Amino acid sequence: MTPEHIETISNHPAFVQLIKRKRRLNGSLTLTMFVAYYGFVLLVAFAPGVLGQSLSGGVTSVGMLVGVLMVLLSFALTGIYMHRANRVIDPLNEVVKQECAR
């Protein structure tokens, strides 16, 4: 691949839009997981009694519920990523490949 070809691709409007959308998607999902995970870690560090409390007097604690919710959040974020990648990013990628292959 020649430097001119690389320059043509990197200046293509669809490629610029592809990069912008990928960065925004990755950044927002990463930030969401970062805030949730470090919020959980801070809760463990500074308020461990809250996580040890029982839910409705049973054996299940608040910490177990929060842990399950963290796992479910990671699955949900993965699903959101897959949906957006299949609906938005992949079609843009195909446009760039088709138009720049000429």
Image (cartoon, rainbow, N blue to C red):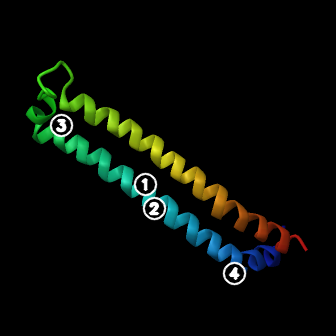
Q: Residues within 10 Å of mark 3 (few under 14, many from 20)?
A: some
Quadrant location of residue 102? bottom right
Residue 56 vertical position relative to residue 98 in the rendered view, above or below? above
Q: Which mark is residue 27?
A: 2
Q: Earlier in the sequence, mark 2 or mark 3?
A: 2
**Marks 3/1: CA distance?**
21 Å
Q: Amino acid at mark 4?
A: Pro
Please, what secondary structure does the residue beneath circle 3 have?
helix
Quadrant location of residue 50? top left
Q: Amino acid at mark 1?
A: Thr
**Marks 4/2: CA distance?**
21 Å
Q: Is residue 74 left or right of residue 92?
A: left
Which quadrant of the rendered structure holds the N terminus?
bottom right
Q: Amino acid at mark 2?
A: Gly
Q: Which residue is mark 3?
A: 44
Q: Which residue is mark 4?
A: 13
Q: Are marks 1 and 2 in contact (CB under 8 Å)?
A: yes
Going 77% across and 73% down the picture, which residue do you hit?
6
Q: Which residue is mark 1?
A: 30
The number of callouts visible is 4
Going 38% across and 57% down the picture, which residue do you hit?
31
Q: Amino acid at mark 3?
A: Val
